[in-house]
Image (spheres, rainbow, N blue to C red):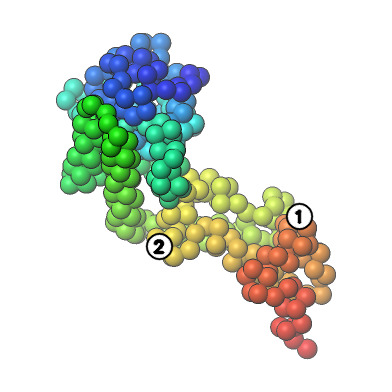
């Protein structure tokens, strides 16, 4: 695996012209000329990457899976993501590009504190953003403005303008992903039903005893999603994240034990997969405002 720590090294490996800025670049994927030995070799980027594919002849291995990107699709990768270029080259004139920027560019800015809001940087390749022609034009105009800014004479305003344009680009991407969730409502509703079925299966006493409390990551993997995509999809469709649904399911089980059984609190905590009884007590207090003992006293019949 090749680890790429700088923009200049990336340009060199891709056979591209020298970068015009040390922390940000836009690479025209139609004109790269990497050496043959770099095809099908995994590489790890230690910076953020946004890539738009505008042809039907470009392949990429992203994370652990191969993905043949549809025309007009965009992917996002955070620092540390593993990528791999396939053997096929882009179609001439396709204008596919890759925007990369180093964390140091935004490290002391307000954008840095907001990066967690852009959860699509942790989506899988098959959860790419598929753009309409109008959406593509909007994003490409911003990318062109970024190129103009970092290619000119840098001054005291350059960094702020680069960061503000990056934030504008990411905010539009967030909006367009919201649109994509909406336009796929029928598919998403099936996914929500699948999630609820899977959650009930994984939240049974038998399943928890065998595998522990369900995690967003394992549920997402079982459904073929990334954890962030699953939670974002559920949030759009239901108003709740995957973690919130897990908590509600565990709460329901805990309440049933408290009301309908004589099991001691430590035993209930153990059955629900909590490592310590105090963890279950804290969990219930956060959800209903009182301890398990108080809840049992108030709601126990007879």
Q: Crowding near pointer 2: few (<14 within 10 Å), some, many (20+)?
A: some
Q: Secondary structure at mark 1?
A: loop
Residue pointed to by mark 2: 237
Relative to 192, residue 134 above or below: above
* Residue 55 percent location from the top left of the image: 23, 30
Please determine whether, in this image, residue 114 is positioned above or below residue 35.
below
Quarter of the picture holding the C terminus? bottom right
* Quarter assignment of residue 266: bottom right
Position of 48 relative to 14 (above/below)? below
Q: Residue at x 21, y 31 (%)?
A: 148
In the image, taking residue 49 as reference, residue 273 lies left or right, namely right
**Image quarter for residue 236?**
bottom left
Q: Position of residue 69 (x, y in %)?
A: 32, 34
Residue at figure coordinates x 64%, y 68% from the top left: 286
- Which residue ends up furthest to the bottom in the rendered image? 302
Q: Decide which of tag 2 and tag 1 comes sooner along the chain.
A: 2
* Residue where numbered disc 1 is placed: 275
Residue 300: x %, y % from top left:
75, 83
Does residue 115 appear anywhere in the picture? no
Asked whether 198 or 62 is in front, the reply is: 62
Front residue of 74 and 49: 49
Circle 2 — which element? helix
* Mark 2 to mark 1 CA distance (whole Å): 32 Å
Is residue 176 shown above or below 82? below
In front of the other: 59 or 274: 274
- Can residue 249 be seen? yes
Instruction: Judge left or right: residue 40 versus residue 99.
Output: right
Which residue is pictured at 27% across the width and 16% down the height?
17
**Which x, y percent locates residue 195?**
51, 57
Side of 289 where 138 appears, left or right: left
């Amino acid at each position: 695996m090749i680890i790429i720590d700088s923009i200049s090294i990336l340009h060199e490996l891709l056979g591209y012209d020298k970068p015009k800025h040390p922390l940000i670049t836009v690479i025209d994927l139609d004109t790269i000329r990497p050496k043959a030995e770099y095809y099908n070799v995994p590489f790890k980027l230690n910076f953020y990457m946004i890539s738009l594919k505008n042809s039907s002849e470009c392949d990429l291995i992203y994370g652990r899976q191969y993905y043949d990107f549809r025309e007009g699709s965009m992917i996002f990768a955070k620092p540390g993501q593993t990528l791999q270029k396939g053997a096929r080259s882009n179609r001439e004139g396709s204008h596919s590009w890759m925007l990369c920027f180093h964390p140091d560019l935004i490290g002391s800015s307000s954008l840095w504190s907001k990066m967690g809001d852009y959860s699509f940087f942790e989506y899988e390749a098959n959860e790419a953003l598929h753009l309409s022609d109008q959406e593509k034009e909007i994003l490409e105009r911003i990318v062109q403005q970024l190129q103009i800014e970092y290619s000119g004479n840098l001054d005291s305003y350059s960094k702020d303008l680069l960061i503000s344009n990056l934030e504008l680009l990411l905010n539009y991407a967030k909006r367009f992903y919201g649109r994509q969730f909406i336009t796929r409502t029928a598919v998403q509703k099936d996914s929500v039903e699948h999630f609820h079925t899977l959650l009930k299966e994984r939240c049974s006493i038998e399943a928890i005893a065998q595998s522990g409390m369900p995690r967003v990551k394992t549920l997402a993997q079982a459904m073929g999603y990334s954890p962030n995509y699953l939670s974002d999809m559920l949030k759009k469709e239901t108003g709740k994240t995957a973690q919130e649904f897990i908590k509600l399911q565990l709460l329901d089980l805990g309440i049933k034990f408290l009301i309908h059984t004589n099991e001691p609190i430590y035993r209930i905590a153990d059955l629900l997969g909590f490592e310590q009884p105090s963890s279950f007590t804290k969990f219930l207090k956060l959800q209903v405002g009182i301890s398990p003992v108080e809840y049992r006293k108030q709601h126990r019949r007879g």
